[in-house]
Image (cartoon, grey):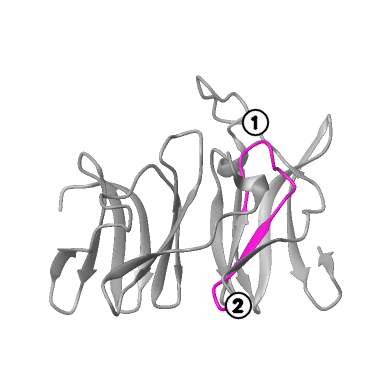
Amino acid sequence: PELECWFTERLGDEVFVLGEDPRYCTARFDPRQNRWRETAPSTYGHLISDPLTCQALGNTITVLSGEHAARMDRHEVYDASQDAWSRQPAFPSELASVLDAKAVEVNGKLWLYAVDYAHVQETFVYDPATQIWAAGPRLPHELYKYGLPHQHYPESGTKWHCTAFELRKRFCLMACFQLAPEDVRYLAFVWDPIRGAWDD
């Protein structure tokens, strides 16, 4: 399909795409059959609305979105085996009006980080087994929040200066941190859940 692609994720042996044409919609590509197909519509009776982040969790896809650009209030999960969406529990109150977020799967859980410029030191963790959101560990320093200027959000650089991934079943973040007003550095940290501490 001719989509303006926003997110791509591996979904088992297929590729999951969330794109815009002209509304947000989702599709799957099976390389074994060289075939595309659209997925079932979202649980809200229409196509995805204003997606903020999209992340594979096992054989499912989690999409966090909002009815309006200034609010992230929808948490839906796409189950590839059923070709069906389901609504998930509400976010923590701190996430009621965030503008952006990045996500990564770590040891079977969904971690949110770089949660717009108002939450530059916070992380949030969702456990699909219990369907519970919880505050994750605070980052050791604030993320650098300036960068690419935006007409309405001048402090919109947070997401462009960081990336996270799973390292030995632990959350690892490589990012640009603001240690002091004149001290900005690229650093990497790994969260040790046993010690409850960050390792350089």
Q: Callout 1 environment at 10 Å: few (<14), some (14 to 19), or many (20+)?
A: some
Residue 107 locus on image (x, y percent): 60, 77
Give x and y (percent) for residue 38: 18, 61
Q: Main secondary structure of the magenta part?
A: loop
The picture places residue 89, in percent across and down from the top left corner, at: 53, 62
Residue type marked 2: Asn
Residue shown at 50%/33% (left/top)?
70
Seen at 56% across and 47% down, the residue is 101
The quadrant in which the C terminus is found is bottom right
Q: Is residue 81 left or right of residue 139?
A: left
Circle 2 crowding by C-alpha within 10 Å: few under 14, some 14–19, many from 20: some
The answer to whether the residue labelled 2 contacts the one labelled 1, judged by CB atoms less than 8 Å apart, is: no
Quadrant of residue 43 within the rendered picture: bottom left
Using the image, tell me which numbered label, if any, was put on residue 107. 2
Q: Which quadrant of the figure has residue 128?
A: bottom right
State the residue at coordinates (65%, 36%).
Answer: 117
Span of residues in magenta? 113-129
**Does residue 198 sit above or below 7 in this rendering?**
below
Q: Nearer the viewer, residue 31 or 99?
A: 99
- Between 123 and 97, the one nearer to me in the picture: 97
Q: Which residue is mark 1?
A: 146
Residue most extreme to the top? 151
